């Protein structure tokens, strides 16, 4: 039985171009979005007369959408406009904060990638010393929230920033391991019925 590919239900607007991209021959409005669940970068066409703003949350699931008409395609980090790139750090940070439990659970449950490397070491600034402290602290008692992590792990940097930085590195697309995002694979043809992403 095939595994159903998980799709984004909600996304945050990174950039909205009323007249489309300047280098495109078409003048339809276009938005660049980032999914809340897998940080999937997407390009979408809004419904007629709908204006979007950076940071706005929009529904992109299978049911009736109120603001988005069509998901055109999944895009790569390199396809992002300068405005979208400028917004990326702040918007990823907001997503991480809004889904605190999910990311704290990652600290509580993350395991080794192989015999030499632990998945927590993929977070920038976490080496063997911090890893040991995190594993020891979570063994004593699971972490309750981000504040609990910084309080109980000595000299731990802000976990929200560590996760945000890692997400952005993964979105850039040259990592061996992906823990927060689905690696981008270029597809030649989009699904005009709603976009396979």
Image: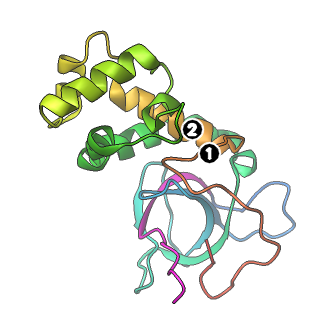
Task: Tell me which colouring the rendered structure shows.
Answer: rainbow
Query: Which residue appears farthest toward the top when viewing the image?
Result: 155
Classify residue 133 by image quadrant.
Answer: top left
Which quadrant is home to the C terminus?
bottom right
**Residue 130 screen position, x and y as percent:** 37, 18
Expressed as whole percent of the image width and height from the top left, the position of residue 167 reads 52, 40
> In this view of the protein, which residue sits in the foreground, 89 or 172?
172
Q: Secondary structure at mark 2?
A: helix
Instruction: Give whichever of 34, 165 is nearer the camera.
Output: 165
Residue 110 versus residue 34 in the image, above or below = above
Bounds of the magenta segment: 1-16
What SS does tag 1 mark? Answer: helix
In the rendering, which numbered label is found on residue 109? none
Asked if disc 1 and disc 2 are in contact, CB closer than 8 Å, the reply is: yes
Cα separation between marks 1 and 2: 5 Å
- Give the vertical position of 142 relative to 102 (above or below): above
Residue 26, x across and y down, in percent: 81, 70
Which residue has dot 1 on it?
Answer: 171
Horizontal relation, residue 37 to residue 20: left or right: left
Identify the residue at the far front of this view. Answer: 115
Tell me the residue at 66%/67% (across/down): 29
Instruction: Please check the rendered image and state whether residue 35 is part of the magenta-colored stretch, yes or no.
Output: no
Q: Residue beneath label 2, please?
A: 168
């Amino acid at each position: 039985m095939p595994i159903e590919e998980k799709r984004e239900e909600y996304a945050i607007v990174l950039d909205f171009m009323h007249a489309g991209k300047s280098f495109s021959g078409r003048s339809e409005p276009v938005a660049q979005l980032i999914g809340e669940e897998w940080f999937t970068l997407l390009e979408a066409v809004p419904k007629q007369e709908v204006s979007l703003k950076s940071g706005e949350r929009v529904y992109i699931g299978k049911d009736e959408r109120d603001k988005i008409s069509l998901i055109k395609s999944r895009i790569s980090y390199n396809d992002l406009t300068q405005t979208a790139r400028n917004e990326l750090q702040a918007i990823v940070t907001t997503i991480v904060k809004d889904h605190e439990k999910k990311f704290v659970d990652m600290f509580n449950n993350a395991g080794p990638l192989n015999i030499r490397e632990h998945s927590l070491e993929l977070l920038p600034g976490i080496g063997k010393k911090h890893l040991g402290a995190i594993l020891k602290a979570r063994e004593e008692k699971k972490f309750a929230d981000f504040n609990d992590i910084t309080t109980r792990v000595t000299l731990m940097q802000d976990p929200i920033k560590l996760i945000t930085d890692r997400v952005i590195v993964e979105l850039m697309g040259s990592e061996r391991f992906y823990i927060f995002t689905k690696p981008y694979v270029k597809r030649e043809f989009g699904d005009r019925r709603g976009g396979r992403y």
